[in-house]
Image (cartoon, rainbow, N blue to C red):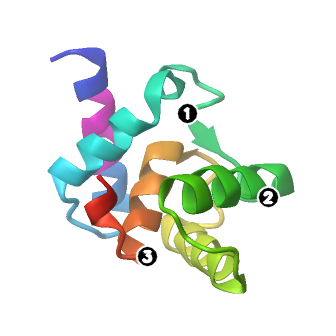
Amino acid sequence: MNKREQLIQKYANDLRIKCNINPDMNLLTKVTINCGPSIYNKDASMVSSTDPSEVDTIRNNFLIKKLKLRESPLLDEGINQVFELYGLSNRNKYRAVVYYLLTKHFGKESIF
C-alpha cells in the first residue's frame, strides 16, 4: 500500500470514528487526489477551524472555485456544520476529510 492509500485509509477511519459516517471510498479517493501534494505535508494536510484565514481559504478556494458555489451565508453555515460534525474540540482536522464532508453537504459529488 502506497503512502496515498495509507492516508486515504486514515481519512476513512476518521470519518467512521469521529463523524460516524461510512465513507464513499471512491469519492474520498477523488477528493484526496484533488488536494494534491498538501496531503503529504503535516501542516498543509490539516485545517484549523479557529483560524479565520483558513476558513476563508476553504470558502474561496474549495467551495467557490472548485465546487462552483456562489458566495452566500450558506457557505459559512456549511463550513460550521462540517466542523461541528468533525468535532469542534478535535484539533486534528484533515483537509481531505473536511473537503469530503463539504462535498457531501453541498451535494456536489458530481464535480469529482
Q: How many marks?
A: 3
The mark nearer the N terminus, 1 or 3, is: 1
- Quick one: 43 or 53, which is closer to the camera? 53
Q: Could you tell me which secondary element the residue under label 3 belongs to? A: loop
Residue that badge 1 annotates: 45
**Magenta run includes residue 98:** no
Q: Amino acid at mark 2?
A: Thr
Q: Could you tell me which secondary element the residue under label 1 belongs to? A: loop
- Counting other residues with Cα less than 10 Å from the Cα at mark 2, is it few (<14), some (14-19), or many (20 or more)? few
The mark nearer the N terminus, 2 or 1, is: 1
Quadrant including the N terminus: top left
- Counting other residues with Cα less than 10 Å from the Cα at mark 3, is it few (<14), some (14-19), or many (20 or more)? some
What residue is drawn where x is 29% and y is 64%?
A: 109
The reply to whether dot 2 and dot 1 touch (C-beta < 8 Å) is: no
**Magenta run includes residue 7:** yes
Residue that badge 3 annotates: 106
Residue that badge 2 annotates: 50
Q: Which residues are magenta?
A: 6-12
